[in-house]
Image (cartoon, helix red, strand yellow):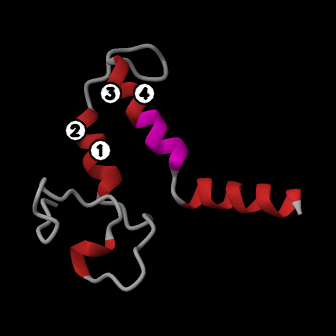
Amino acid sequence: MHINISTELVSKYNSLRLEQVSGLEQSMACGDDAQGKPYKTALSDLKAFLGSEELPLSPGATGAEQNVFAVRPAGRPDRLLC
């Protein structure tokens, strides 16, 4: 049972690309990349990640709503910013 749970968690971790998300977050928060150099490509890296076809899709969603990382303006859940 524990092996099944850990296998499922690792599968979810990988399918959601959480390692890449955490790397982007860490680089943006600290201002340095993994090699300790100034992080200057945050916007282009974030756009590339969010525009990736590899992101998981929400069940039943269509078009831009398929992207689980789509940005919705505060107070307007019916509109997408990207």
Residue ID for mark 1: 46
Please state if 45 lies on the left or on the right of 26 as rendered.
Answer: left
User: Of the residues under marks 2 and 4, which one precedes in the sequence?
Assistant: 4
> Dot 3: few (<14), some (14–19), or many (≥20) neighbours within 10 Å?
some
Residue 28, label in figure: 3
| Element carrying mark 3 | helix
- Which x, y percent locates residue 15? 56, 61
Q: Identify the amino acid type marked 3.
A: Met
Image point 13% across, 53% down: which residue?
74
| Element carrying mark 1 | helix
Residue 20's place in the image compared with 9, above or below, is above
Residue 65, label in figure: none
Give the foreground label among 4 and 1. Answer: 4
| Whole-number angstrom distance, CA of label 1 to CA of label 3 | 10 Å
Residue ID for mark 4: 26
| Whole-number angstrom distance, CA of label 4 to CA of label 1 | 12 Å
Determine whether label 4 and label 3 are within 8 Å by CB. Answer: yes
Is most of the magenta stretch helix, strand or loop? helix
In magenta, the rendered stretch is 18-24
